[in-house]
């Protein structure tokens, strides 16, 4: 599974990013580059009420939770499950509750990606 660049089906003008930056300078910039090529998904984190830091879960449980959260699952059917399975099938899968502060979630994600958070959280 890979994250791929979204096709430009809306015809967004090239200067739209500059206009957005004028409204909210933190929304775009060199530290937030667009996805220009397919990128592998390294980590999948699903929501688990009451779970402290990230805890490893099976790919099957991660796929179940991703499927349950997909708003268009009924319309897309098996194609959606197959696509989500591609994401969970190659990634390390974890569950995590919602921390008191959003920064804690961000810290956990960064820790998982750079190997600072062990498999037990």
Image: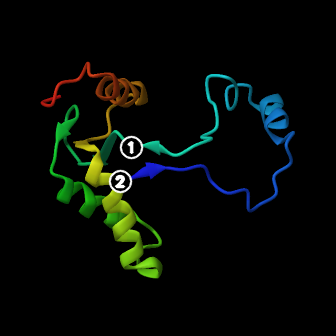
Between discs 2 and 1, the one toward the N terminus = 1
Tell me what residue is drawn at x 64 percent, y 31 percent: 33
**What residue occupies the far left of the structure in this picture?**
120
User: What is the spatial separation of the Cα atoms under label 2 and label 1, in whole angstroms?
Assistant: 6 Å
Instruction: Specify the color scheme.
Output: rainbow
Categorize mark 2 by other alpha carbons within 10 Å: few (<14), some (14-19), many (20+): many
Q: Nearer the viewer, residue 95 or 80?
A: 80
Q: Position of residue 99 (x, y in %)?
A: 32, 33
Q: Is residue 43 above or below residue 28?
A: below
Mark 1 highlights which residue?
41
Q: Quadrant of residue 27?
A: top right
Q: From the image, which quarter does the C terminus lie in?
A: top left
Judged from the image, the secondary structure of the residue bearing numbered disc 1 is: loop
- The answer to whether residue 38 is left or right of residue 115 is right
Q: Position of residue 4 (x, y in %)?
A: 54, 50
Tell me what residue is drawn at x 83 percent, y 42 percent: 16
Mark 2 highlights which residue?
87
Tell me what residue is drawn at x 82 percent, y 57 percent: 11
């Amino acid at each position: 599974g890979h994250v791929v660049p979204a096709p430009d089906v809306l015809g967004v003008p090239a200067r739209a990013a500059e206009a957005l930056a004028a409204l909210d300078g933190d929304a775009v910039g060199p530290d937030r580059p667009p996805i220009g090529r397919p990128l592998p998904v390294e980590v999948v984190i699903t929501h688990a009420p009451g779970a402290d830091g990230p805890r490893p879960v099976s790919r099957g449980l991660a796929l179940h939770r991703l499927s349950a959260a997909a708003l268009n699952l009924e319309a897309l059917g098996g194609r959606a499950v197959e696509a989500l399975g591609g994401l969970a099938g190659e990634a390390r899968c974890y569950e995590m509750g919602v921390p008191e502060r959003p920064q804690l979630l961000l810290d956990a994600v960064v820790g998982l990606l750079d190997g600072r958070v062990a498999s037990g959280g």
